[in-house]
């Protein structure tokens, strides 16, 4: 992808390997994008469509587009403005949501300088000690988070061989979680940081977060119908289908390949967010037509940040909006509700 190639040019090797890389052979990383080719969008030519409407809503938020920002750690690797730069790009685009990672390199107050009151969800990597978890949730709520995302797929670090080869350590601290780390995050490896976070995650944690926060809780990292059912049973208000962008369990299917089955199990009880591999409007369309309510964008937004600061972020979001509108027009779908109803065609020879 062109954007990716340009971003690589402007980033140091270690930071680039961390951002672009996946785990193991990077089979799952590649498959996340490739597996969208397992389904085809049917062109509709007599559908009487003009100016498709991309607006939708989720959990009381009215959105201009059916995509939000995924939680990503350490934006400072891409640009000196860190998370505040991403936040400003999101705020200037408007009508979407920023997910704030627990491993952000900026404090809530610094992110707010860019976010300017725009909607935000908070992603937590839990501490082994619930007292710290309560403090973090209290701060996220005071900052205005309207949902909690429990990332459950990263109880330890995937086998990130690029990071090992580059001897990658975070060059700056992690103010939100430093209270439960032995250091402040600076010069620490991802392995070390994950090891100090909670490993044993169960439905009890979903229940704890949802009862303590009083906010809707998404469980992020769901790849099976079984886990979706467990999460909802424990009180999850949303399912976040993701394989962490191919950074955790290599050898897992493409995230898109797991979506339809999970959606059937969820059966409309709670909203579904989908991520991992979204690079084009076609991918957004296919995810929505396979059961997602909205999708989350990951690496492409950071590539934009690396290349142009907040303007780069805004421009990437505009690209996805324009591309999705084009696909909606060509597929004869006027609204997001129409996209969700669209039938995709199985393409049996997609691997060739
Ligand atoms: N997910 C989290 O829940 N918390 C994080 O702190 C986090 N940090 C990430 C850092 C990087 C550099 C990347 C690329 C992903 C990270 N993710 C994190 C995963 C994203 O939320 C998302 O699942 C993933 O980026 C989707 O894949 P894609 O970027 O290839 O589309």
Image: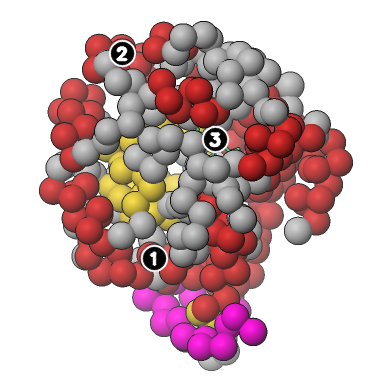
Do we see residue 88 in this rendering? Answer: no
Image-based side of 56 in relation to 279, left or right: left
Q: 194 or 116: which is nearer to us?
A: 194
User: Which mark, residue 132?
Assistant: 2
Residue at numbered disc 3: 72
Q: 78 or 213: which is nearer to us?
A: 78
Q: Earlier in the sequence, mark 1 or mark 3?
A: 3
261 over 310 or under it: above or below: below
Q: Is residue 332 magenta?
A: yes
Residue drawn at (57%, 88%) of the image: 349
The response on whether ligand 1 sits within 8 Å of label 2 is no
The response on whether ligand 1 sits within 8 Å of label 3 is yes
Residue at numbered disc 1: 258
* The C terminus lies in quadrant: bottom right
Q: Which residues are magenta?
A: 330-352
Do we see residue 229 in this rendering? Answer: yes
Q: Earlier in the sequence, mark 2 or mark 1?
A: 2
286 over 46 or under it: above or below: above
Structural crowding at the residue carrying mark 2, measured as other residues with C-alpha within 10 Å and reported as few (<14), some (14–19) or many (≥20): some
Residue 200, horizontal then vertical, whole percent: 27, 33
Q: Secondary structure at mark 1?
A: helix
Image-based side of 178 in relation to 214, left or right: right
Q: Secondary structure at mark 2?
A: helix
């Amino acid at each position: 992808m062109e954007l990716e190639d340009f971003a690589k040019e402007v980033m140091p090797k270690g930071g680039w390997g961390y951002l672009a890389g996946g785990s193991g052979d990077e089979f799952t990383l590649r498959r996340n994008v490739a597996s969208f080719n397992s389904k085809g969008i049917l062109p509709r030519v007599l559908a009487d469509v003009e100016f498709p409407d991309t607006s939708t809503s989720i959990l009381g938020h009215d959105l201009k587009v059916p995509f939000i920002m995924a939680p990503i750690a350490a934006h400072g690797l891409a640009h000196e403005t860190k998370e505040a730069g991403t936040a400003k790009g999101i705020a200037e685009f408007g009508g979407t949501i920023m997910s704030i990672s627990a491993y952000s390199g900026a404090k809530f107050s610094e992110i707010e300088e860019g976010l300017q009151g725009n909607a935000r969800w908070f992603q937590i990597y839990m501490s082994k000690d619930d007292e710290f978890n309560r403090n973090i949730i209290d701060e996220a709520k005071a900052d205005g988070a309207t949902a909690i995302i429990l990332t459950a797929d990263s109880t330890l670090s995937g086998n990130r061989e690029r990071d090992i080869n580059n001897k990658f350590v975070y060059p700056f601290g992690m103010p939100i979680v430093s209270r439960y780390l032995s250091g402040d995050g600076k010069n620490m490896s991802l392995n070390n940081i994950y090891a100090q976070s909670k490993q044993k995650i169960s439905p009890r944690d979903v229940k704890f977060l949802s009862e303590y926060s009083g906010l809707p809780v998404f469980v992020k990292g769901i790849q099976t119908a079984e886990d979706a059912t467990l999460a909802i049973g424990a009180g999850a208000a949303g399912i976040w289908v993701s394989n962490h962008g191919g950074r955790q369990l290599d050898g897992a299917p493409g995230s898109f390949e797991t979506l339809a089955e999970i959606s059937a199990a969820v059966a409309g009880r709670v909203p579904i967010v989908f991520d991992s591999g979204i690079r084009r409007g076609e991918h957004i369309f296919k995810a929505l037509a396979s059961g997602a309510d909205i999708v989350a964008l990951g690496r492409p937004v950071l590539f934009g940040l690396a290349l142009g600061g907040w303007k780069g972020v805004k421009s990437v979001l505009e690209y996805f909006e324009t591309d999705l509108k084009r696909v909606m027009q060509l597929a004869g779908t006027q609204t997001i509700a129409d996209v969700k109803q669209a039938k995709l065609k199985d393409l049996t020879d997609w691997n060739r």
